[in-house]
Amino acid sequence: MNIRDERPAIPADPASLDIKKFIAYLKGNRDEQEEMNIPTSISTSITDRIQSLCPIKALSRVTYTTSDRLDVVVDFDENETSGWVTNELIRNDELASISKVSIHLHQLFAKPKVAHSLLDDHSIKVEEFIKDKITIQMAASENKSFLYGDGVSQPKGILTYEISTDEPAPKAIQGIVGGNIGEISDYSKIVELMELLPSKYLSGATWIMSRNAASHIRTIKDETTRKFLWQNSIAHGVPDTLLGYPVVICDDMPKVSEEKDDRSVPVLFANLYEGYQIAEKPTITILKDPYNSKPFIEFYATKRVGGDVVNFDAIKALVLTK
């Protein structure tokens, strides 16, 4: 009797089997068009990488859901109170400020193309190639939508809301005029913008700006001490700081000279974890299309994601005018 035949079979790893099926799907010569879910380990890797490439998403609150809508309960009462419980019941009018924001998920797609020769080359990990292409394309689309999305076919963008430079207004981002379009040079306006954000949001606050805006602000000095407001980081992976708060470079933010509606909004100072909510489904699907992009094979990958501002008080904007 062969002892090896008596050994119990070791069950195959389901994750490994899923990846093998995925590779076979990518390389297969089947003409029929059929959609499949990308294996969980690969879709998770794509999601994590997108978050690292998408500055707005990395700073915001992200919730995963299996539904096409996420309902978020929001308290619009800025006069939050606490105290000791008494025998008195809570009055109905004390709940009047509580509302619900519904974030609808929209379909995002990426269409990487692959040459037949690459699929036939056994020395190349085609699943890694496809994963990287999907990641880069989706990250670029997501980041722009979180700033400029219309809320109809994509997430509702932060900069699509009204920005009030006067008194705070309902469902509007409070801003401060920091100068004329094309130039940021006023030290006091940078400080005033920082002081607009309520203290309870400062622990997670971040400056968000494009490289173009950063190049203007780097040269600003404290008028009293003559020291630069901008402090360069001395350690890899640690962000530069402005007035003690980290700076995140987001190249999708407007340039200082980029004008829209007679104004430019090149800088945000915000706690986006409190201010912006992102919802998405963890599943990513893919469809192989060998016909429409000959001599290439096109892969159509989709996922569902949504986003919206849920706390306007946690986001402040620097506005430049004519």
Image (cartoon, rainbow, N blue to C red):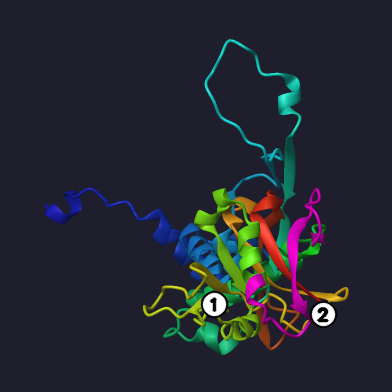
Residue at screen point 79% across, 50% down: 171
**Amino acid at pointer 2:** Glu
Magenta segment, which residues?
161-188
**Residue 256, picture quadrant:** bottom right
**Residue 54, picture quadrant:** bottom right
Circle 1 residue: 224
Front position in the image: 169 or 228: 228
In reply to whether residue 163 is colored magenta, the answer given is: yes
Q: Is residue 78 above or below residue 59?
A: above
| Residue 296 visible (yes or no) | yes
**Amino acid at pointer 1:** Thr
Front position in the image: 211 or 117: 211
Which of the numbered marks, if any, corresponds to residue 274? none
Provide residue 17's location: percent of width, then percent of height.
42, 60
Q: Position of 274 compared to 68: left or right?
A: left
Q: Position of 32 compared to 271: left or right?
A: right
Provide residue 143's location: percent of width, then percent of height.
65, 69
Front position in the image: 226 or 162: 226
Residue at screen point 73% across, 79% down: 291
Q: Secondary structure at mark 1?
A: loop
Which of the numbered marks, if any, corresponds to residue 259? 2
